[in-house]
Image (cartoon, rainbow, N blue to C red):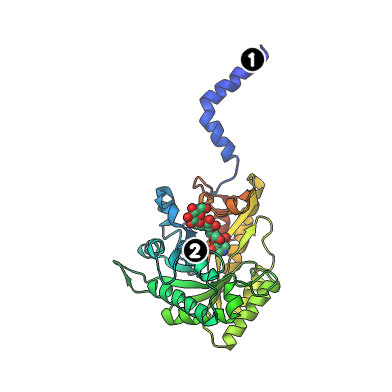
Amino acid sequence: MAFLSLLSIVALSVFFHGVTAQTSTTSALPTSTAVVEGLNYLARNAGKKYFGTATDNPELTDTTYTSILENYEMFGQITPGNSMKWDAIEPEPGVFTFTDGDVIAELASSNGMMLRGHNLVWYEQLPSWVTDNNYNATGLTEVIQTHVTTEVAHYKGQPYGQILIHVRHAWDVINEPLNDNGTMREDVFYNTLGTSYIEIALTAARAADPNAKLYINDYNIEYVGEKSTAMQNLIKSLQAADVPIDGVGLESHFIVGEVPTTLVENMQAFADLGIEFAITELDIRMELPETAELLEQQKTDFYTVVNACLSVSQCVGVTVWDWTDKYSWIPSTFPGYGAATPWDDNYQRKPAFDGIAIALEGQSI
Ligand code: G3I
């Protein structure tokens, strides 16, 4: 009898509070408490050029998503996650399809946001005609020059449709050229042309748009180690040969609780080369399920990374690799991991958002 009563109390409670009960399971996890201006507003106040995000074309049909994405106070810079890559832009030799890339460029331009072109020469998302045609050095040089020149010229700051793209900022000209041990990645470009492919691409990009900042972008160069040293040596050799190079992109795909401790020291080493750098693809993943402890640690980790950028003036800005867990690349690539961004998949701000805001406000966590 007592058991039945207890059951009915539970049943009534679920009946009257079902929605609340469901919410409270979720809300048992901490959320953002910060009341602040947008992150881009704070970043610019702190002397940075932008706080930005990656985005991708399929997400743009989601109006809740776009209502936050298109807020300049929140994001002052956009990177296309896929639609400016080689397979999207030049799927067949000499056939250029700018449609999806143009959507992102127009989105950036119409909201006054900087545009980071991503990317021109990368071993992934490369159409098979580039890899399978057995180009010799002369042939592949022409292929690179045509691709880089045509794409960079297309997105140069000039009237485009009805809109002037006046805030295009940077290009990831070379993406992920190094192995983790610091040697050159043996892809079709390196195997055919040696390191000269880097000079070929950078030179073509500079000629096509003299005002764009030209970057090499990579991961696992965010901390002191042989890959970062190799990147520094690559930059030095390009500078010695008068090859145009303006910056290095530190991707920064980290794991909660494992953010490197040498971020600032490493950033200073790049700054000492006389170049700028940016955090280009920040996310901090955790092993699921999310817990309050993991979310609090993630808040500290986002704070640490953004604070590192603030502490070195040559760090021009921070870009998250999409801002909501709903569209993060992590779960499909790292099964069992996720929740890597500052907003959850229901667009609620997480403690990670506060970690970023606190750093940008110059406060201590
Ligand atoms: O376009 C095809 C589509 O036709 C097909 O139906 C679908 C089925 O899976 O796949 C689509 O391609 C996917 C593409 O994203 C576009 O959505 C690929 O499978 C998928 O692998 C690809 O993932 C992208 C990944 O780069 C490729 O390496 C991620 O979205 C993108 O976020 C990620 O971004 C990279 C940066 O460019 C460089 N640094 C690392 C970062 C994370 O991997």
The residue that mark 2 highlights is 51
User: Where 356 sits versus 201, above or below?
Assistant: above
Count of marks, rendered view: 2
The residue lying toward the viewer, choosing from 12 and 55, is: 55
Q: Residue at x 39, y 65 (%)?
A: 98
Q: Residue at 62% of width from left, 15% of height from top? A: 5
From the top left corner, tell me how far across and down residue 150 is, in percent: 41, 75
Residue 108 shown left or right of residue 315 in the figure? left
Neighbour tally class for label 2: few under 14, some 14-19, many 20 plus, Cα within 10 Å: many
> From the viewer's perspective, is 160 left or right of 73?
left
Whether residue 361 appears in this view of the structure is no
Q: Kindly report the distance in space between the C-alpha atoms of the residues bearing marks 1 and 2.
A: 57 Å
Residue at which label 1 appears: 4
Q: Answer with mark 1 or mark 2, whichever residue precedes in sequence.
A: 1
Amino acid type indicated by mark 2: Phe
Relative depth, front residue between 196 and 348: 196
Q: Quadrant of the C terminus?
A: bottom right
Query: On screen, 124 above or below 141?
Result: above
At which x and y percent is residue 47? Answer: 50, 70
Task: Tell me if residue 21 comes above or below residue 27 in the rendering.
Answer: above
Residue 106 position, x and y percent, is 37, 63
User: The residue tagged with tag 1: helix, strand or loop?
Assistant: helix
Q: Residue reaching furthest top?
A: 1
Q: Position of residue 32 (x, y in %)?
A: 54, 49
Amino acid residing under circle 1: Leu
What secondary structure is found at the residue carrying circle 2?
A: strand
Q: Where the N terminus falls, by quadrant?
A: top right
